[in-house]
Image (spheres, helix red, strand yellow):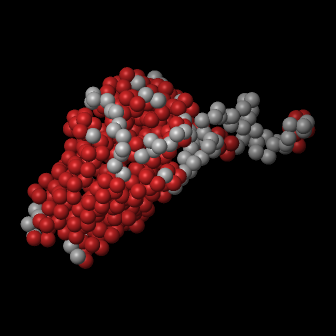
Amino acid sequence: MNQPDPGPAGATGVLEHPDAPSSISSPRTHAATTPVRPSRDPLVRIFVRQVLVALGMTGDHGPKSSNWQALAHPKFRWYFIGSVTSNFGTWLQNTAQVVLAYQLTHSVFAVGLVTCAQFTSPLLLGPWAAVLTHRIGNWRALIVTQIASTAIAATLAALKFSGALTIDWLFAGALAIGLAFTFALPAMSVMVAGLFSDNENEHERARAVKQAMAMDSVSYNLGRALAPAISILIFTIVGFGLAFALNAGSFFLFTLVLLYLRPRVKQQVPNRSRVMNGLHIALKEPRVMVLLMMVAAITVASDPILVLGPALAGHIFHSSADWSGVFIAALGAGNVIGSLRPRRPPSIRRVAAVLGMLALAMMVFSAAPSIWLSIAAAFGVGMACLVAGATARSLLIGCAGDDVKRQAAIMAAWAVAWAGSKPIASLADGSLAGVIGVRATGILLAVPALLPALILVLRPQIDNLSFAARWSAWLDGAKGIGTAHS
C-alpha cells in the first residue's frame, strides 16, 4: 500500500490494448494485421485506477497481523472479559434509554438531548478530568467511577421498577453516567498499557500495546453488537428496568476484575493538562489536526443511527420504534467484523477512502426504501467506522513517536475528538430532524466524512481554491505517516 505505485499500463505514453502482442513482435506487422480502433475501455480502467491510487486503495503489501493476538496475554484477557461485560451492560442501557426517551416524549429532539447529556462531560470537562484522574491515580479513579456507575444504573432501575422514572430522571442518569465515563476514559488507556509492563522486549511490548488499544475499542463494539437485540427482548418481555439493573451488575463485575488486576507499581504521569497539550500539538502540526478532524467526522457521521433510529423505524418505515435496537446491533456487528480484518500499514489515504465509504453507507441508511436495506447499510457503517477509527488512531500514535508525554497529549486530544463530538452531533440530529426531516438530517451529517475522499480524488481541479488547496496540502503532508512510523 505504501510502496510507490508502478503506474498504469502503457507508462511510456501509449495506451496499450489489452490484447496487444509481446514486445518481441514486429511493430510493423502488428500495425498491419491488427487495426487500432479507439476504445473507451482503457480510458475507463485508467480513470478507475487513478481514483483508487488517489485513495490509497491499490496494492496489498506489508505485514499483516491480527489485533486479537493481544488476548494471548493473561492480564489483558481478564481485562478484556471485564470490559466486554461492562460494555454489554452499557449498550443494554443505551438502547433502552433511547427507545424509552422516544416512548415518553415521541420527540427526536428529546432522544438527541438524552444522548447529548451522556457525552457532554468529555467535551466540557475532559482537560480537567484528565489532570484530576492522574493525580488521584488511574487505578483508583477507575474503581471509583465503576462503583459510581453501578449506583447510577441501579438507581435508574429502581425508579423504573417503581414507576417513577421520567424523562428528567432519564436525562439526569445519562448525564451522571457520562460524567463517570469522563473520568474513567483517560485512566483506561494508561491501565491497558500498564498490563504489559512485564514484557522485557520493548518492541514486542509496543506492538502488544497497540493491539490491546485496538481491542479495547473492539470490546466497546462487541457490546454494541450483542446487547441491542437482547435489550429489545428484555424491555418488550420484562421491562426497561431489567436493562438498567443488568447494566448495574456489569459495572460491578468489571470492578471486581479491576480489583484483581490492581497494578503493583505506581505509574508516573505528567501533571499538566494532556488535552490542552494535545490541542497545542494539533495547531502546530497539520497532520495531527487532519486526523483529529477525521476522528470527529467518524463520530458525527455514525451518530444518526442511534438518535434517528426510533423515528426512522416508527415514522418512516411505520414499524415499532424497537427496531432502532436492530439498527444499533447491525452497527456494532459491523464494528466486530471490521476488527477481524487483517491489519495493514496505516495510511492517511486509507482513512479518507474508508471515510468516504462510511458516508455513502450512512446516506443509504437514511434514504433506503426498506428497513432491511437500512439494517444492511448500518452494518456497512459499522465496518467503516472500525477500520477508519482504528487506522486514524494508529496514525496518531505514530505521530506521537516514543515521547511518553507527547503520546499522552495526542491520545487525550483523540479522546476529546471521539467523544466530544458526540454531543454536538446528537444535538444537530435532534434539532435538524424537526426542521428538514429525518432522512435529510442523516444524509447531511454524513457529508463531512465524504469530504476527505473527494479532496483526494478531485485534487487537480481544486488546487486553485485556497481553502481546498490548504486541506489538500495537509492531506499530502500527512500521507507519509504510515511509512514513517509504522
Closer to us: 333 or 214: 214
Q: Where does the N terminus fall, quadrant-wise?
A: top right
Determine which quarter of the picture holds residue 25: top right
Closer to us: 320 or 205: 205
Point out residue 6 in the picture as x, y percentages from the top left corner.
69, 34
Point out residue 70 in the picture as x, y percentages from the top left corner.
49, 51
Identified at 25% across, 53% down, the residue is: 146
Identified at 81% across, 43% down, the residue is: 20
Q: Is residue 83 above or below residue 193?
A: below
Q: Is residue 430 left or right of residue 208?
A: left
Q: Where does the C terminus fall, quadrant-wise?
A: top right
Point out residue 457 in the picture as x, y percentages from the top left corner.
51, 36
Identified at 46% across, 23% down, the residue is: 464
**Residue 431 appears in the figure:** no
Identified at 20% across, 47% down, the residue is: 179
Q: Residue furthest bottom?
A: 237
Q: Residue furthest left?
A: 164
